[in-house]
């Protein structure tokens, strides 16, 4: 099943292997550069059915760090298009490319992971962040401003504009980031959303803004598949749970969402995550059993036989890998060899399979 085709909206993926959107924290002023070119070119001829471009900010203050890719002006658009056009020339013809659009909210204005991942100090070019409620991510962090209706309309429009730019660039698919503690997740969670208006309180209210953003992007891109990365659980008492995620996925399905990629955590500094291989697969499975929507699972998946088993057991429709591809950009080739499947690879590398 790992190498079987799957339709996502009006596009067909040649297999069910997805390269996860992996932030490289290497952009300058939101623009892609040679680092992104080499990174994505490796992934482009990996043989994966879908390559997801890293989380891309819909406005400048929506970036996580000063080095995140953005899609909020013409220069950003041109840098991504130039990179994608060059990557496509070297990629397998059947490979599809998607982009993940997001807004960091209160988790923006931070250091890169290898610099500490803390909030930016005064000498590190910080900016004022925003959130559904003025609650800092962690003790000592900057306090975000509470979003007004005008702010929310601006951000919704930023998602729409970025999605239209993504369509012009030539992406096959758009994914909205609603997980990992970023802005849309912050609205969903009772931990970070303490609003007293129609966007806070009940689950129905907390879902309202993320659903509005999805609907607006869907309306602006009727010919492109639109999916969302969501949180299955926050691994926190009193937080967003799998039961909430099932309801949220059902609402997304009603609006025409083509799939959900089910991740977890990220909205609190020290969640109690039972970290082990496939620790999130059961979240995808529960949604798949309760909602008629395609699911993608992610999180420490590395063994091809185990990935095959996830699909065969009907726990997910697709599998996404990140760390496995960083370790081995030829993971798909090895998986095909292990599972006895013939796949297309660049002819320049065919000698890899020649017996001595």
Image (cartoon, grey):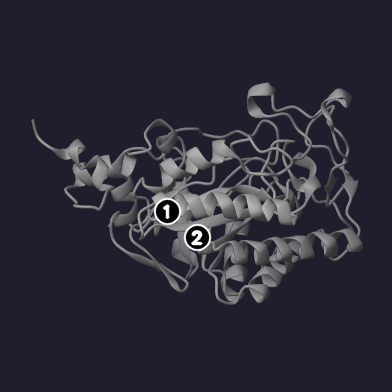
Q: Is residue 44 left or right of residue 192?
A: left
Q: Mark 1 points at which residue?
A: 89
Crowd around label 1: few <14 · some 14–19 · many ≥20 (10 Å):
few
The residue nearer to you, when weighing 32 against 146, is 32
Residue at the spot 59% in from the left edge and 61% down from the top edge:
169
Placement of the N terminus among the 4 image quadrants: bottom left
Q: Where is residue 301 in the image (x, y as percent from the top left)?
A: 40, 40
Placement of the C terminus among the 4 image quadrants: top left
Nearest to N terminus: mark 2 or mark 1: 1
Residue at the spot 33% in from the left edge and 46% down from the top edge:
307
**Mark drawn on residue 287:** 2
Q: Position of residue 147 (x, y in %)?
A: 88, 54
Q: Is residue 153 left or right of residue 65?
A: right
| Mark 2–mark 1 distance (CA, rounded to whole Å) | 37 Å
Residue 102 in view in this figure: no
Q: Check whether the beta carbons of the residues at disc 2 and disc 1 lie within 8 A of each other.
A: no
Count numbered badges in the picture: 2
Q: Of circles 2 and 1, which is in front?
A: 1
The residue positioned farthest toward the left in the image shown:
356
Q: Where is residue 225 in the image (x, y as percent from the top left)?
A: 53, 69
Q: In this view, does 143 lie to the left or right of 85?
A: right
Determine whether the residue tagged by mark 2 lies in a helix, strand or loop: helix
Crowd around label 2: few <14 · some 14–19 · many ≥20 (10 Å):
many
The residue nearer to you, when weighing 296 against 251, is 296
Residue 13 in view in this figure: yes
The residue nearer to you, when weighing 105 against 288, is 105
**Mark drawn on residue 212:** none
Residue 71 position (above or below residue 324): below
Determine whether the residue tagged by mark 1 lies in a helix, strand or loop: helix
Q: Is residue 287 left or right of residue 112?
A: left
């Amino acid at each position: 099943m790992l190498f079987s085709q799957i339709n996502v909206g009006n596009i067909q993926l040649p297999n069910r292997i997805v390269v996860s959107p992996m932030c490289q924290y290497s952009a300058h002023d939101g623009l892609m550069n040679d680092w992104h070119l080499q990174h994505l070119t490796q992934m482009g001829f990996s043989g994966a059915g879908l390559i997801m471009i890293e989380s891309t900010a819909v406005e400048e203050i929506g970036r996580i760090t000063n080095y995140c890719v953005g899609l909020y002006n013409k220069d950003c658009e041109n840098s991504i298009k130039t990179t994608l056009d060059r990557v496509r020339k070297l990629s397998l013809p059947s490979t599809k490319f998607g982009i993940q659009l997001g807004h960091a909210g209160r988790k923006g204005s931070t250091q890169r992971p290898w610099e500490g991942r803390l909030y930016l100090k005064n000498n590190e070019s910080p900016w004022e962040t925003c959130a559904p409620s003025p609650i800092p991510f962690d003790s000592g962090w900057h306090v975000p401003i509470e979003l007004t209706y005008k702010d929310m309309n601006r951000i919704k429009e930023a998602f729409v504009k970025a999605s239209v730019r993504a369509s012009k660039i030539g992406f096959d698919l758009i994914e909205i980031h609603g997980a990992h503690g970023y802005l849309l997740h912050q609205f969903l969670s009772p931990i970070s959303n303490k609003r007293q208006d129609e966007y806070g309180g009940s689950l129905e209210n907390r879902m309202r803004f993320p659903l509005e953003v999805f609907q607006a992007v869907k309306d602006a891109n009727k010919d492109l598949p639109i999916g969302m990365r969501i949180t299955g659980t926050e691994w926190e008492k009193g937080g967003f749970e799998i039961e909430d995620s099932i309801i949220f996925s059902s609402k997304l399905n009603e609006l025409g969402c083509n799939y959900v990629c089910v991740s977890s955590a990220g909205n609190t500094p020290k969640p109690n995550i039972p970290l082990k291989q496939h620790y999130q697969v059961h979240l995808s499975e529960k949604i798949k059993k309760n909602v008629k929507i395609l699911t993608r699972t992610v999180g420490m998946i590395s063994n091809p036989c185990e990935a095959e088993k996830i699909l065969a057991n009907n726990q997910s429709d697709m599998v996404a890998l990140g760390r496995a591809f960083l370790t081995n950009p030829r993971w798909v080739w090895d998986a095909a060899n292990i599972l006895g499947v013939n796949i297309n690879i660049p002819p320049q590398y065919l000698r890899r399979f020649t017996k001595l």
